[in-house]
Image: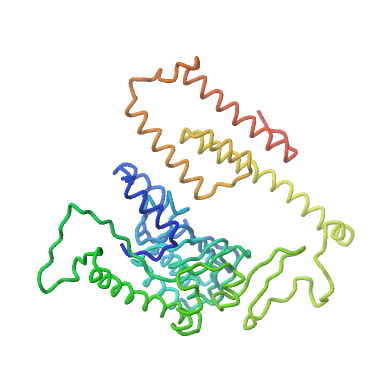
Amino acid sequence: MWWLLEAGIRRQLEQAQAAGIVPTAEQQSQFMAFHGSASAQSSSRIMAVAGDTAEITVKGVLTKEPNFLAMLFGGGNTTFPEIINALAEAEANPAIAKVVLAVDSPGGTVAGLFETLAAIEAFSKPIESVVSDLAASAAFALVASTDKITATNRATSFGSVGIVASFAVDEDVVTITSTDAPKKRPDVTTEEGVAAVREELDALHEIFVDAIAAGRGTTPEEVNAKFGQGATLLAGEALKRGMIDAVTVAQPSLAVVASADIKPAAHKGGNDSEKGPMDLQELKAQHPAVYAAAVGVGAEQGVKDERDRVSAHLTMGEASGDMKTAVAAIGDGSGMTNSLQAAYLAAGMNRRDVDNRQEDDKGAKAGDGLTPEDNKDAEAEAGAGILAAAAATCGVELEA
């Protein structure tokens, strides 16, 4: 498989494959049901619409088909067909005026990438990218094809421009090709074999770099020379080299550092350049009715959001049998991220496998003096304690 993927994630996937971590047919079926079919026309899993803007989430390893290992080791798994379908829906919806790609991805496979780049190129409405942590390799090619790229923080990384292939060498296997097809199975332990593989990689690299250059309005030579030569660059350096257009930086109020050829948006304080953001006390003094409504609704919404967050973790923890992860996530304030969902899903699958193997050994944990019911009660009590603490933080009382 040809990868356009950041090196660290690629190594994890290859190590997992080498270790024989392969989902069973049942696990794969459940994963597909959880993830959704890549060929499905609905893109509700990755697209949300607010006002006239559609946000398409591009997270984790990018593949042509849903991939169980990519989901577990790559921080999530978005498929290229999902992105293409989301763009088609946004194009067809007259209420959507623009699209934002919310990206955090180490890249993915060559298969499916160029069809997706073609879909972005054919998209008629404004489209920009906002990158939260990483846009590497295939993911960088996607964002490079949009109208504007903004990094949400200075630690965001971009680049990893290049094609890579990995080969496992088995000394017990001898491969022989027909006389006129010496490049069909190149021997990568020889200089000739390496040269044959690199020839194919270079051809793909040329197409890949051409796409990035076209998207960024530069030349392939500039991309090869200035865009990291296979390395990833932090947002500030990427901005200097023309790889991206803006970086959001944390100041007393958020500001955006943009490149010279991007016009900054008007200051939200109005025409008075000296006027800063209005604080709560000023809002209360000048607009008491608005203040009362904002504070009331905000507090109520905060309580509701906290209840929903805690409830989601307790539900997933109980369903998967992984209350330890649930209690930890509730305690440290974590939302229901793709990584945590993957952890719950894996825990549920593992628990079911263990239950199937130990069906007749229900007393295996009796050595600690507690029955399975006692353990379940203890987990429930711990979850209830966390829920009560969260409620107290929000200043509300839980109903019995």
How far across and down, in percent of the image, does residue 78 sit?
43, 59
Pick whichever, 28 or 239, lies toward us: 239
Percent across and percent down for residue 69 are: 38, 50
Image x and y of residue 375, in percent: 51, 23
Q: In the picture, which quadrant includes the C terminus?
A: top right
**Residue drawn 87% across the image and 57% down it:** 281
Which quadrant of the view contains residue 210? bottom left
Q: Quadrant of the N terminus?
A: bottom left
- Farthest residue to the left: give it: 179
Visible residue check, residue 96? no
In this orientation, which residue lies closer to the viewer: 39 or 74?
Answer: 74
The picture places residue 273, in percent across and down from the top left corner, at 81, 76
**Relative to 137, is 359 above or below?**
above
Furthest toward the top, the residue is 369
Q: Is residue 174 left or right of residue 226?
A: left
Image point (64%, 33%), residue name: 386
In the image, residue 270 above or below residue 353: below
